[in-house]
Image (cartoon, grey):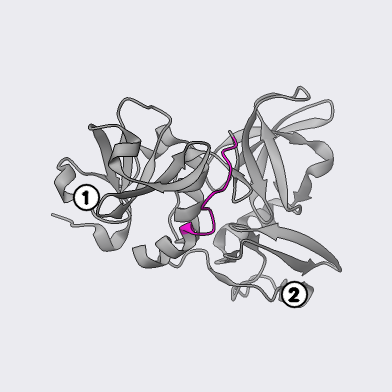
């Protein structure tokens, strides 16, 4: 395998780890349909860089599905569908594969190539690039409510702070960093906390790995007491925040 070669995830979820050693720390996860570049190879592991958010990690070589450079570029240009069901099944290339919320489906109107003939999916989906408003986002969040905390996770069956925020925004049509630290630079800064609007991101200054989505009133969604929950400012226990605005509907351009 050559460095720089390309791949795509054709399993429901694949762990991305910090090193090539067995049992290494979980950094993130690959979902069905997410594509990447190969950076390195050691024994039975390969290091990859995910196209969607540039995150890197190591996966097992036998969980890697190679694709050509041409196919990789075609995927970049295609407005695929994204799964918005909690979980489901796709019939792809003559086999059934279980998929999760946020998986990218090889279903598109792009005429560069036609995979539709090989795909069957009867669940709920939307175009990955279609940007949606806060009320839609709020409904999506319900699929993550009570999801257990998992460092490096990004599915409704185990998720961390950055994974929760990233995946909710991803399905709403926005590309964010995988980490809380990266998300603190997303969108536009809000200097006056009295001006925050539903859908804005709130990061407590004293907790560097903590982040929430503001829901309006005194409600925030994020990891609290080991799972995704809706909490008030008293539960967060923080008075100083970094606030960022990403949703287009909320943006005011001077």
Is 168 situated above or below 105? above
Measuring 76% from the left and 77% from the top, which residue is drawn there?
A: 117
Mark closest to the chain's N terminus, 2 or 1: 2
Tell me, for residue 120, which label it has, or none: 2
SS state under label 2: strand
Q: Is residue 83 left or right of residue 53?
A: right
Q: Position of residue 160 (x, y in %)?
A: 53, 39
Measuring 29% from the left and 56% from the top, which residue is drawn there?
A: 198
Is 199 situated above or below 5? below
Q: Which residues are magenta?
A: 141-150
- Judging by the rendered image, the residue that carries numbered circle 1 is 196
Q: Which label lies toward us, 2 or 1?
A: 1
Q: Is residue 130 left or right of residue 102?
A: left
127 or 101: nearer the eye?
101
SS state under label 1: loop
Task: Say if the magenta span includes residue 71.
Answer: no
Q: Quadrant of residue 57?
A: top right
């Amino acid at each position: 395998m050559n460095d720089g070669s390309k791949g795509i995830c054709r399993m429901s979820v694949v762990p991305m780890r910090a090193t090539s050693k067995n049992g290494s720390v979980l950094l993130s996860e690959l979902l069905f349909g997410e594509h990447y570049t190969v950076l390195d190879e050691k024994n039975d592991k390969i290091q990859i860089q995910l196209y969607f958010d540039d995150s890197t990690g190591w996966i097992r070589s036998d969980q890697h599905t190679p694709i050509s450079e041409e196919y990789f570029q075609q995927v970049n240009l295609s407005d695929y569908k994204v799964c918005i069901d909690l979980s489901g099944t796709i019939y792809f290339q003559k086999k059934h594969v279980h998929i999760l919320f946020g998986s990218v489906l090889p279903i598109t109107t792009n005429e560069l190539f036609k995979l539709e003939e090989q795909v069957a999916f009867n669940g709920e989906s939307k175009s990955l690039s279609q940007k949606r408003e806060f009320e839609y986002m709020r409904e999506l969040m319900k699929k993550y409510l009570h999801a257990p905390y998992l460092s490096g996770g990004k599915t409704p069956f185990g998720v961390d702070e950055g994974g929760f925020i990233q995946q909710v925004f991803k399905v709403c049509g926005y590309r964010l960093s995988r980490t809380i630290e990266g998300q603190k630079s997303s969108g536009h800064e809000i200097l006056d906390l009295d001006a925050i609007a539903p859908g804005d991101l709130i990061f407590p200054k004293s907790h560097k790995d903590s982040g929430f989505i503001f829901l309006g009133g005194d409600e925030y969604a994020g990891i609290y007491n080991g799972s995704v929950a809706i909490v008030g400012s008293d539960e967060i226990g923080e008075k100083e925040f970094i606030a960022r605005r990403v949703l287009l509907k909320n943006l005011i351009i001077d």
